[in-house]
């Protein structure tokens, strides 16, 4: 079909993702300037959302897809979540509600129309005017920071918050000043920067939650390609908030030796302090196990299994970086994993997690 908009012709085609059929621009240049587009790279992000909500015990949820884009995520939730999961779903986007409505008509929806609401507002206004939700999905271009306050305010007890951040260069240390301003934390490029990004993001969300006595516990976190994704369970409990804040610490990193350690302090001569960041568990393994059992998708299964098997400790060592420092060839990965009682790491194929200290690991290498 040919559409004529603002003196530009868009050639549209239908595509299917999961159980959603939507119309997309045949020739999209994926960029921030193009306000609304379908991004196939984020299919895995949406797959994980469906898997997580199907694995969580929540039922009869009121769901808010606050930045819905083409509407593909909402349509997939409607068509792929188990029968008793959705009480109501609100699909909102400030730019694209016409497009969303068209796409909803293209898919054969497995939910009564009365349970679906469309909104075309700024996400913060939309949330603050609402009575609250059991699942809120924040999926912006760039930082989710602008939407944290209203989302946390409107997140119900025992609700789930899904947060995507695509400003990974900020979180991972390319723009440390911006990171301090937005996330109130110091970032630094290192071998486990994708993990420190997740931990910096988690702490920020937890601080916003703590203001409202909402403890936001990460239940599933991962870093992939250009984005970080964290799902939080919300428990209304002041003591739990304080417990979470006790887990906000620093990682001291020595760029000369590549040694690192978790610390309550942010200063040591010639070491760099990354953080504050959350040093607790990034995911709940029982939930991940359920997600693994629910999927047949190879990519999803692979990522989930890697995360499930990761040691629950802070940081990792990049063996390529370490070998370079030591001026020795990269060691056999499997052999080091065995000897160091280590695990692989989902965010870096060259890295391992081990309880060994740097000197012991260097000897092994
Ligand atoms: C990354 S896209 C969302 C993609 C979508 N969630 C998906 O899974 O395909 C970000 C969307 O946020 C919308 N947006 C940007 N600022 C907004 C705001 N203040 N309130 C509501 N929507 C906004 C844009 O129109 C865009 O469609």
Image: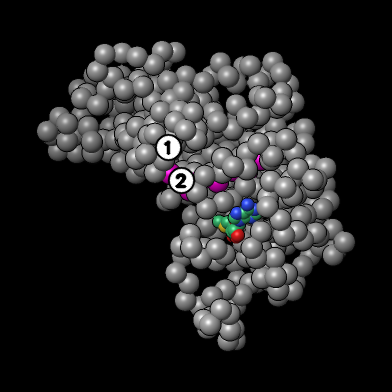
Q: Position of residue 229 (x, y in %)?
A: 53, 44
Mark 1 and mark 2 residues within 8 Å of each other at the beta carbon: yes
The answer to whether residue 6 shows anywhere in this view is yes
In the picture of the structure, the residue carrying the numbered disc 1 is: 178
Render colour scheme: one colour
- Quarter of the image with the C terminus in it: top left
Q: Position of residue 145 (x, y in %)?
A: 56, 40
Q: Is residue 290 magenta?
A: no
In the rendered image, the residue lying farthest to the left is: 327
Ligand 1, by image quadrant, is bottom right
Res 144 quadrant in image: top right
Q: Nearer the viewer, residue 280 or 104?
A: 104
Q: Position of residue 173 (x, y in %)?
A: 36, 36
Q: Position of residue 261 (x, y in %)?
A: 36, 19
Distance of mark 1 from mark 2, alpha carbons? 10 Å
Does dot 1 land on a helix, a strand or a loop?
A: helix
Magenta residue span: 160-168
Q: Nearer the viewer, residue 108 or 135?
A: 135
């Amino acid at each position: 079909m040919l559409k004529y908009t603002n003196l530009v012709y868009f050639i549209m085609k239908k595509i299917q993702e999961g159980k959603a059929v939507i119309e997309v621009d045949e020739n999209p240049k994926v960029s921030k300037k193009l306000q609304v587009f379908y991004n196939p790279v984020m299919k895995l992000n949406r797959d994980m959302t469906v898997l997580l909500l199907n694995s969580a015990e929540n039922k009869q949820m009121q769901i808010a897809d606050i930045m819905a884009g083409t509407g593909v995520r909402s349509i997939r939730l409607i068509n792929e979540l188990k029968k008793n999961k959705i009480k109501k779903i609100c699909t909102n986007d400030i730019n694209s509600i016409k497009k969303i409505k068209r796409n909803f008509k293209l898919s054969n929806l497995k939910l009564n129309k009365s349970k679906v609401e469309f909104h075309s507002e700024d996400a913060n206004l939309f949330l603050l005017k609402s009575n609250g939700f059991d699942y809120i999905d924040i999926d912006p271009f760039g930082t989710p920071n602008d939407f944290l306050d209203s989302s946390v305010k409107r997140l119900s007890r025992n609700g789930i918050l899904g947060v995507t951040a695509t400003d990974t260069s900020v979180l991972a240390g390319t723009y440390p000043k911006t990171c301090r301003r937005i996330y109130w934390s110091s970032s630094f490029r290192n071998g486990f920067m994708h993990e420190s990004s997740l931990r910096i993001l988690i702490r920020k969300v937890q601080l916003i939650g703590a203001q409202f006595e909402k403890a936001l516990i990460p239940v599933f976190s991962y870093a992939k390609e250009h984005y970080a994704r964290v799902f939080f369970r919300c428990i209304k409990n002041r003591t739990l908030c304080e417990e979470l804040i006790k887990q906000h610490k620093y990682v001291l990193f020595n760029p000369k030796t590549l040694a690192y350690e978790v610390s309550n302090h942010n200063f040591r001569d010639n070491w760099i302090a990354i953080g504050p960041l959350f040093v607790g568990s990034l995911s709940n393994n029982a939930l991940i196990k359920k997600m693994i059992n629910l999927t047949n998708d190879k990519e999803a299964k692979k990522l989930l299994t890697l995360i499930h098997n990761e040691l629950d400790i802070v940081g990792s060592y990049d063996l390529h970086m370490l070998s370079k420092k030591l001026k020795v060839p990269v060691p056999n990965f499997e052999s080091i994993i065995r000897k160091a009682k280590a695990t692989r790491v989902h965010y870096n194929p060259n890295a391992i997690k081990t309880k060994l200290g740097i000197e012991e690991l260097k000897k092994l290498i």
